[in-house]
Amino acid sequence: MPRIRETFAVYSGDFASQQLAFAHLLDSCDRLGVHVDFDFVDVIPVATAKRRLGAYFEGATADQAIAAADGDTLIVIRSAACNSFPPFSGTERLSLISTLVGTAVSAGIET
């Protein structure tokens, strides 16, 4: 599949599980009136972030996100997932690390 350039919002926080991170994100979006398509959200434990972030960013950019993490979890949201970008500047449990440019898989037709 082809890859396209995309901007991503990268957040950091502490969550006991992936499910709790998604639940917090869903509650926060609802409370803030922000629409996020969760098909374009990735919740990543910092412990495995280098490999997982490699799907979106080149090495130095992935390292930058990991180094800036102030929790045990990273949440990566594609700009295509939101009705506003970044969807929010942070919550009581999430801090916006940065918006970073990377690539994402596109379901479009290869030419």
Image: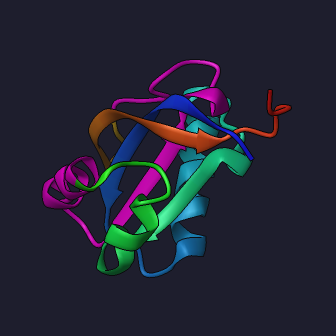
User: Residue 3 location, x and y as percent?
Assistant: 62, 39
**In the image, what residue occupies the spot 86% across and 32% down?**
109
Q: Is residue 78 above or below residue 23?
A: above
Q: Is residue 65 above or below residue 66?
A: above
Q: Is residue 63 magenta?
A: yes
User: Residue 24 location, x and y as percent?
Assistant: 53, 57
Q: How many marks?
A: 0
Q: Is residue 75 magenta?
A: yes
**In the image, what residue occupies the spot 54% across and 51% down?**
25
Q: Is residue 50 visible?
A: yes
Q: Residue furthest left?
A: 67
Determine which quarter of the picture holds residue 93.
bottom left
Tell me how the rendering is colored: rainbow
- Location of the C terminus by quadrant is top right
**In the image, what residue occupies the spot 41% across and 60% down?**
54
User: Residue 70 location, x and y as percent?
Assistant: 18, 60
**In the image, what residue occupies the spot 72% across and 38% down?**
106
